[in-house]
Image (cartoon, rainbow, N blue to C red):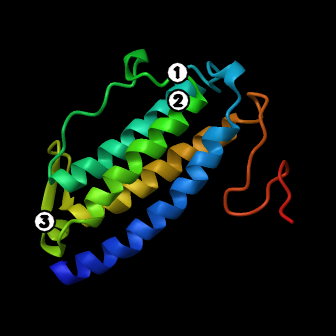
């Protein structure tokens, strides 16, 4: 992929990520406070764990793309300070747009440059931007399936739900 192609792809992906961010916030806002320990299986993350994972890793992945290098993933323990959905919403709204703006400012050359993800995957930065969107949407989908068992309602994601009818 050349630098012009990387820049064009990045512009599309950045707009897509911005659109997905709105949906992610809607899902976060729908998470009930009282059942954050809910998990469908012992191997699954808890509701709180997913709130933290999505918030912290969306920012982390975008910053790794902007930095052109991967750093160790963020600490998603209580030390991260995200203790409820409101904390996740505030942190997400504060930090993820800033990280996305760093990617937006990248040159086509930098976006086309290969980044090594811990020796497991080597790909151009723009490919990791696409992966960041997929990662976020995947875990947001997990969290959306937790909402009803946690006592919440599923907001519209890509259309109406059994809980929310569109006008």
Q: Is residue 4 above or below residue 118?
A: below
Q: Position of residue 106 (x, y in %)?
A: 20, 66
The one nearer the camera, 139 or 35, is 35
Rate crowding at label 3 as few (under 14), some (14 to 19) or many (20 or more) other CA atoms within 10 Å.
Answer: many
Q: Position of residue 114 (x, y in %)?
A: 13, 62
C-alpha distance separating marks 1 and 2: 6 Å
C-alpha distance separating marks 2 and 3: 35 Å
The one nearer the camera, 5 or 121, is 5
Q: Residue at x 15, y 54 (%)?
A: 68
Q: Residue at x 52, y 24 (%)?
A: 43
User: Which mark, by number, is residue 87?
Assistant: 2
Direction from residue 151 to residue 79 in the image, left or right: left
Q: Is residue 66 above or below residue 140?
A: below
Q: Is residue 100 above or below residue 142?
A: below
In this view, the mark in front (2 or 3):
2
Query: Disc 1, disc 2: CB below 8 Å?
Result: yes
The one nearer the camera, 68 or 88, is 88
Residue designated by label 1: 83
In this view, the mark in front (1 or 3):
1
SS at mark 1 in the image: loop
Residue designated by label 3: 113
- Residue 14: quarter of image: bottom left
Q: Is residue 101 above or below residue 72?
A: below
Direction from residue 164 to residue 70 in the image, left or right: left
Q: Residue at x 53, y 63 (%)?
A: 19
């Amino acid at each position: 992929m050349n630098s012009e192609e990387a820049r064009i792809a990045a512009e599309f992906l950045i707009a897509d990520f911005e659109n997905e961010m709105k949906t992610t916030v809607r899902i976060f806002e729908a998470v009930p406070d009282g059942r954050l320990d809910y998990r469908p299986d012992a191997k699954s993350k808890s509701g709180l764990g997913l709130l933290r994972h999505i918030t912290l890793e969306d920012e982390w992945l975008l910053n790794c793309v902007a930095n052109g290098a991967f750093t160790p993933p963020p600490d998603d323990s209580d030390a991260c300070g995200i203790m409820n959905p409101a904390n996740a919403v505030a942190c997400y709204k504060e930090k993820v747009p800033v990280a996305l703006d760093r990617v937006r400012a990248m040159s086509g050359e930098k976006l086309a440059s290969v980044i090594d993800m811990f020796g497991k995957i080597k790909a151009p930065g723009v490919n990791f931007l696409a992966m960041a969107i997929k990662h976020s949407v995947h875990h947001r989908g997990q969290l959306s399936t937790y909402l009803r068992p946690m006592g919440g309602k599923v907001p519209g994601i890509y259309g109406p739900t059994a809980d929310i009818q569109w006008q």
